[in-house]
Structure formats: structure tokens, C-alpha cells
Image (spheres, helix red, strand yellow):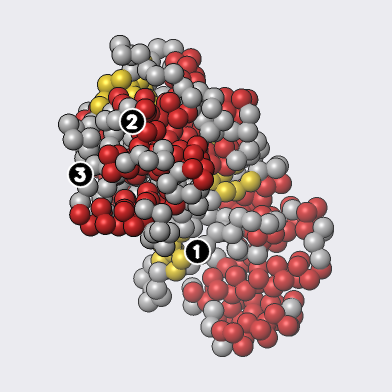
Amino acid sequence: MNLHVLVVEAALLGPEPVARVDAAPLLAALVPEGFVPEVRWTGAGALDLGGVLDGEDAAARAARRALLCEYLDDVAPSGRPVVVVAPDRHASGEPCAAALVEAAAAWWPDGTVRTSSLLLSRPADDVLRGLAGAPPRQPDDALCLVDATGDDGAAASLPAAILRNYTRAVLGHGERSLGTQSVWDGAERASRAALLLASSGQWLRADLSLAQVRAALAPGGELFELLTRPQPVVEVLARALFSGDGGGA
Amino acid sequence: MTTVSILIPHYNDPDGLALSLRSIESQTWRGAREIVVVDDGSRPEHQARLDEVIATSPERIRLVRNGVNRGRPWTRNVLLDNADGKYLTWLDAGDEYYPRKLELQLEGLYAARAAGATGPIWATAHSDLRWVGGQRKLRRVVQRVDGDQLANLLLDSLRAYLYTLLGRTETFRDVGYFDLKLPRLQDLDFFLRFIERGGRLVLPPGDESLCVYHKTDVGRNGDEVLRCNQYLFRKHAAWLMTRSRRFRRNRQFHQHMLAARFTNNNDDRVATLRHLAASASTSPWAFGRWIVKTRGRL
């Protein structure tokens, strides 16, 4: 078995599921001729294996990893590399992708198991890891192969769901960490803001550091610095939402 | 290493087999598979065409010959002995799989295991039924796997159609051989024995039909079907005695009605009347309900 595990920050894979069809061009570029199994055990048909690999405790998660390896044996066309997408961590914080790689190496002692990390950008990766309390990746980390962000902070080649999940993760963090001190008064306006941005094709810049993100989210911060390519209509809507009297937006 | 063995009994229907093979070629599941065909003593003119069909198929096919006609249960036992795959599935020559059958049924087996199932599991599937040569429309057969599966099998809400199944090969072998005393309904007996041994049938994700059965009663002997049903009743009496008298009487009523359908579809009116009379005497209430519901149409 030639297995390629694409590791993605858990926050980028949910809450909005990333459809396989949206990620197909990216995966095809990463592993030409790669077979991406449609693992539907949890019913979603999504790209993310997090739901499949999660379990109540460490033993249950180990059993799920073994079950996945057996399943890949059953469904993989002979001679083709298999690509799976796994979150960095389980919801519990326990490593997910690394444990899968370890289990796969033991399951196929004669096979090859490769890994790549999908980054929205290195700064965005640092932001997410900072929010999750994980240390930043090392600059020479061999796992970091994909960086799809353009110069303007946009990442048009990635599935839109990943961009929207990033926006939600960052805005949600601002709301949770600042509470009533935040620009949205802790009234779940962050999720509404994320939806608003998503509906207008906008997302947060992925080229800002964690310090810049936190400064923008803090009282007195300028939220527009976080947005990619702000359009006038979005500016108007966003000002109504963020200015304190736009609770109905 | 074969992952799935697809087992096909064949008798005098090479063109039907070609249709079945084409449906296997179109499967979305692309893992390692092997087809085992056991020819049950087809006539010589069909043997040549059978060889041609197998030679022109791109699938990996192993042909085993019984030499003489030994009947369906014997042939299915030969198929069971010849299955090399980790999983096996069945298909009768002339019937078809829809393209996602194997893919979704494997998903169903894993979904059940991921949910904690530990005993033997077979994935069944909803299917379509098309009457050969008739005017009747394609009918969807929905499998009901919740509740008491033994009762569901006898009530026909869970159909004992082998071609709807996929499961691990050892779970089929653990059931034992098909009963040679059952020229008909040996598949129902096989299902019942699987459930009695603690097996469980599950459905794959989604609601789509995964195969189509081209059904005909022509040439089938209604009296033989009735005898097989009565033999099954005796064989599984220990379980049946745990059910109510009404349940058993209703099943006997349906046995006679099934025999009547077979004889009717083979234009044997005397035998049809005999079976209908037996149905009416077994359960007048059920017979009256049938008359009202169908206006006497079998």
C-alpha cells in the first residue's frame, strides 16, 4: 500500500464539511493518479476522516484507525496510491493524523506512508495553532508542502469551505476570548459575521500574524484589516454589523 | 489476493450471464475481485456460447463445471467451496448489479463495525424486480432490517434474495452448506440459519436500489415450492413454536398462496384452484382480505 496522508488543521475542516469534489483538483495536484476513498461511515461523504477516526477513548480511537487501514486495503485499486485527509488533532486535543500515520506504518510494514500538510498559509497556520495552544511549526518542517495563499492573502485555489471555516475559527475565537469586550458583545455576532462574509465571497486574510489578528479583534481594533479584497457592499454591511448598532444585520 | 469473490451459478443462459458480467464491469468499486461461475450441466449448444462469453469478458473469471445438472443448492455449495475472497457476494446469471452495489455494501459493513457490531454481518440492499416478458412495471423491493429479522424474513418484509448480499466469506461458510433437500427456497433457509446463529443483516448508506432481479415463474413447479415451504416449516419448527398460532397460520396461508401464484403463472388452473382452496381453509379471514384487496388477482 502506498498511502498519502494529507494533514489539515482540524479548524479548517469543520464545522462546514469540505466536499470531496471541491478538493479533487487540489488532491490530484498533490498525488497524481491518487485514489481518494469516499469513506461514508459517518454518513457525510465528506473529505475529512476526523469523524471516522474519533472515538470515546484512546482504545476506541485505536480500533477506528485499525478499521480504517483494513478498509483502505479493501477498497484501494491495485497499484494506485491512496490519499486520505486527516485533521491534525481530535476534538479532545489528542493527535489524530500522527497516530494514523503510525498505525498505517505498522499495518503495511512493506508499504510506504507519506504525509503532507495543507496550510491555508504559514501565518494562518500559526494563527490556528496559536488559538489551539499548539506550538508553531518549525520553518524546516518537512510536512509543510502545500501553501496555497496568494500575495493578497486570498487563497482561491483552496476549497471555499476551508476559507469559510478559517474565518469562523478566527472570528469565533475573538468572540470567545474577548466576551463582552469584543466588538460583537459576545452575542454570537461572530458567527453571523462569518456567514455574512461567506455569502459575499469574502474571508479573513490568511497572511496576518496571530498578534495582528488579536489586535484587530480587540476593542479599538480595525476589523477591515482582516478582510480580503473588501468590496463596497461588504464594507457597508460589515460596518452595520460591527459598529455596535447593527445587531440586526 | 482477492478481496471480493462474485459467485454466479449458470444453467443454459449464457446471454443472461453476459448481461450480469457487464453489470459487474461497471462497478465503481475497483478493488481486487474474482468471478466464479459454476455451470450446472448446461446443454452443449450453451456450453460453447458460455466459453465465448467468459473469454471476451475483461473480468477475472474462473469457470467450474458440474458436468451434469445437479440443481441449484448443489451448485451454490460448489460456489461456496470455490470462493477465495475475503468477502463474497452472489449474482444469478441474468440478473444485474447497479454500479455502486459493491462500493456501498462494503461501506455498510464498515459502518456496522464502526458502530460496534461484533457478530457476523451481511450487508443486504434494496433492489428492483422486473418480471420477464410481462407487462408489469419495475417494482422496488425495500428490505426491512429493523426489529425481529427472523419474523421479517417469514413475513417477506426482508427478502431472502442471495444476490442482495455481501459479507465476509467465513460468515457464509459458518452457516454451512445449502440444504440439498430444498430445490427451491434454499436461500430462505440459508438466511434463517444465519440469523438463528446470531447473524445480523444491515443496509448500506443511502436509500437506492443496488441490483435488479429479472424474475419469472415460468417453468417453476408450484407444488414443489409448497413442499419446500412445508419442509422449511418443519426444519425451523423450534423457532416457529415461539410465535403465535396466528403467525404460523398466516405463514401457512401465504405458502399456499405462493404455490397458487406459481401454478397460475404456469397456466395450471386445477392446481391453482386447489391451492386457493387450501389457502381459504387455512385462514378464511386472510383469504377474504386478499379477495377484497386484489379482486382475486394473483
Separation of marks 1 and 2 at Cα, in angstroms: 61 Å
Mark 1: give few (<14), some (14-19) or many (20+) Cα within 10 Å.
some
Question: Where residue A229 is drawn, which disc sits there?
Answer: 3
* Spot occupied by residue A108 in the image (x, y as percentages of width and height): 44, 17
Given residues A79 and B288, the one toward you in this image is A79
Residue at 47% x, 16% y: name it: A102
**Secondary structure state at the residue bearing disc 3:** loop
Query: On the image, numbered disc 1 is attached to which residue?
Result: B141
Q: Please tell me in which quadrant of the rendered image residue A165 appears.
A: top left
**Is residue B126 visible in the rendered structure shown here?**
yes
**B37 vs A70: above or below:** below
**A147 vs B67: above or below:** above
* Spot occupied by residue A216 in the image (x, y as percentages of width and height): 35, 37
Q: What residue type is labelled 2?
A: Gln
Q: What residue type is labelled 1?
A: Val
Residue at 54% x, 70% y: name it: B262
Q: Please tell me which of labels 2 and 3 falls first in the chain.
A: 2
* Spot occupied by residue B205 in the image (x, y as percentages of width and height): 48, 50
Q: In the image, which is nearer the foreground, mark 2 or mark 3? A: 2
Q: What residue type is labelled 3?
A: Arg
* Spot occupied by residue A115 in the image (x, y as percentages of width and height): 35, 20
Query: On the image, numbered disc 2 is attached to which residue?
Result: A212
**A42 vs B223: above or below:** above
Point out the residue furthest to the left here: A151
Cβ atoms at labels 3 and 1 below 8 Å apart: no
Q: In the image, which is nearer the foreground, mark 1 or mark 2? A: 2
Q: In the image, which is nearer the foreground, mark 3 or mark 1? A: 3
Given the image, what chain letter belongs to the residue carrying mark 1?
A: B
Cβ atoms at labels 1 and 2 below 8 Å apart: no
